[in-house]
Image (spheres, helix red, strand yellow):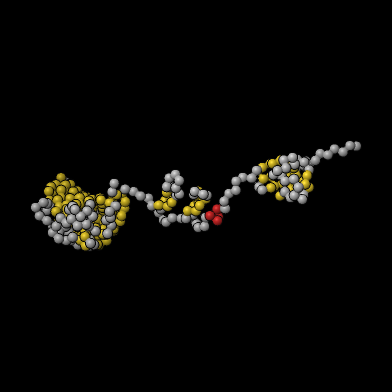
Amino acid sequence: MATVTLGNIKFNWKGAWNSGTAYVIDDVVSLSGSSYVSIQAGTNQNPASASAYWQQMSAAGTDGTDLTSTLTTQGDIVYRDGSGLARLGYGTAGQVLQTGGSGANPSWGTVSSDFVHLGSATASSSSTIDFNGLFTSDYDVYKIFFHNVTHSSSSADMYFRFMQSGSAITSSSYYFHINQEGYNDGGINSAGVTGAFPSSTDTKIRMNGDGILNTGNYHAVGEVDIYNPLDATVYKAVKGYVHHMTASKILHSNFFGRNTSTSALSGVQFLPQSGNIASGKYHLYGMKNS
């Protein structure tokens, strides 16, 4: 009976190609990341070039980069620089990843805003609340928000002073004006024009009238605006409002004032008419120059 050669009935994986091995049809080898199947028996026929003996089954992809040698520390990230993959080390707490645009590498940076929180203070039986050393040339206008403010004496008004070289200006060089209105014991209350402006001066700026900063559930809220504190060519100006109340009164006081000094300021100070500031939270913000 005649013999019929069927050959292999499945591919035979032979591993990496070896020049000294005799391969037969349907043997499969690997070489440089690609795989080849034998289509003709032979020895020392390189699969990458001997197309009469081998047919390519799969091609090697592009070699990657071992990122374990690029990234060294927890928090690192990898990016593409001008020549290849590169490491960007972790930034500092609160920073964000920023792009420099086309042709530039990314970097860590701080979020910038035109309205920036510069500092805060909490009153707790405090004689004064001072914001000193926070004025810079980056800002022309500053805003202070305050809330939950009470005084140890229920009849003590709120006062304000400028500071120079770390100390409050206590000379009689302030001018101010207050306009107060609100609801008082079942009727409309209006204190109208109060304060010392422009005929006389004071040692501080009064912020509210009818001092009723009671402790307990009643407290004062408001804000203060400060202009050009570092400008040595102008008087230093301030304006703001105070909203305060008792069980029988709800009052709103608008105030504005200035100091006759043109020297640069180092800060501002809040103080009570008497006693201390029993409680309160104060936040200072700067509005960036355009």
The vertical placement of 81 against 6, above or below, is below
Say which quarter of the image contains residue 211.
bottom left
**Horizontal and vertical percent position of residue 195:** 12, 52
The vertical placement of 1 against 215, above or below, is above
**Horizontal and vertical percent position of residue 70:** 53, 55
Say which quarter of the image contains residue 92.
bottom left
- 195 sits left or right of 132 in the view: left
**Horizontal and vertical percent position of residue 10:** 75, 42
Quarter of the image that includes the N terminus:
top right
**Horizontal and vertical percent position of residue 227:** 22, 51
- 208 sits left or right of 199 in the view: right
Nearer-the-camera pick, 246 or 66: 66
Q: Residue furthest left?
A: 199
Nearer-the-camera pick, 232 or 130: 232
Q: Is residue 207 visible?
A: no
Say which quarter of the image contains residue 42.
top right
- Taking the spot 13% from the left edge, 59% from the top edge, the residue there is 172
Q: Is residue 98 visible?
A: yes
Q: Residue furthest right?
A: 1
- Taking the spot 49% from the left edge, 48% from the top edge, the residue there is 82
Nearer-the-camera pick, 110 or 239: 110
Nearer-the-camera pick, 74 or 109: 109
Q: Residue furthest front?
A: 49
